[in-house]
Image (cartoon, helix red, strand yellow):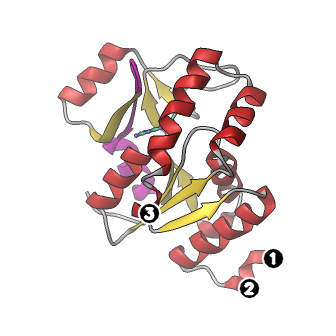
Amino acid sequence: MKGGKLIIFSAPSGSGKTTIVRHLLEKPELNLAFSVSATSRPRRGKEKQGEHYYFMSISEFKNHIKNDDFLEWEEVYRDNFYGTLKSEIERLWAQGKNVIFDIDVAGGLRIKRKFPDTTLAVFVKPPSVDELKIRLKKRSTESDDKINMRIAKASVELATAPQFDKIIKNYDLDVALDEAYRLVADFVGVNKENEDE
Ligand code: 5GP
């Protein structure tokens, strides 16, 4: 596989990486396209097939693993598989896009290792594990059990931050959004003057 640039945002669940990724996707000059992942987790609320995820059964997901269709995949939570289909990246590269990912830390680092020179791997750091808990509860998309599972994983994930190219502290969202823009603009080679257009 060969193509354009890859920009990865990884972080514990609730750190705000999805908000950052959505913000960057609204900037046409960055020429970004979102890598839609495959997942076996159930669809939440307003999520759309093929837009937020390619939702599929566990057995469909396992078939893709068997066929070597994934660039990377993880069982992020028990029985909840997530993965990046090679076909998705090839599709976006064929459109001449830089591909942006919202994926877990293990998957992010795996892609960085596969494409070390063309990948920018960014870790989004939450203020604290307690603050993560508050954010996840506020979001109220998961049960208490699931929230606790995500919190338990967060401590392990935080320890991987130094392996990323850059770390953004998401203590103040506006500051984090600006910093993310600057990092990505530099990486894809957009001039600073374009920022205010
Ligand atoms: P959620 O269920 O909240 O949408 O996502 C749970 C976690 O799985 C998040 O950290 C999200 O970034 C991660 N994730 C989403 N897609 C992928 C993927 O394709 N690969 C990996 N490794 N993780 C993913």
Figure quadrant of the C terminus = bottom right
Label 2 secondary element: helix
Q: Which mark is residue 193?
A: 2
| Residue for badge 1 | 196
Magenta highlight on residue 148: no
What residue is drawn where x is 20% and y is 36%? 68
Magenta highlight on residue 83: yes
| Residue for badge 3 | 162
3D distance between C-alphas at marks 1 and 3? 31 Å
| Three-letter code, disc 2 | Glu
Point out residue 99 in the picture as x, y percentages from the top left corner.
Answer: 48, 56
Q: Which mark is residue 166?
A: none
Callout 1–callout 2 Cβ contact below 8 Å: yes
What residue is drawn where x is 67% and y is 64%? 28
Front one among 95 and 59: 59
Whether 80 is drawn above or below 84: the answer is above
3D distance between C-alphas at marks 2 and 3? 31 Å
In the rendered structure, which segment of residues is drawn in magenta?
77-96
Residue 57 visible in the snapshot: yes
| Three-letter code, disc 1 | Asp
Please tell me in which quadrant of the rendered image residue 156 appears. top left
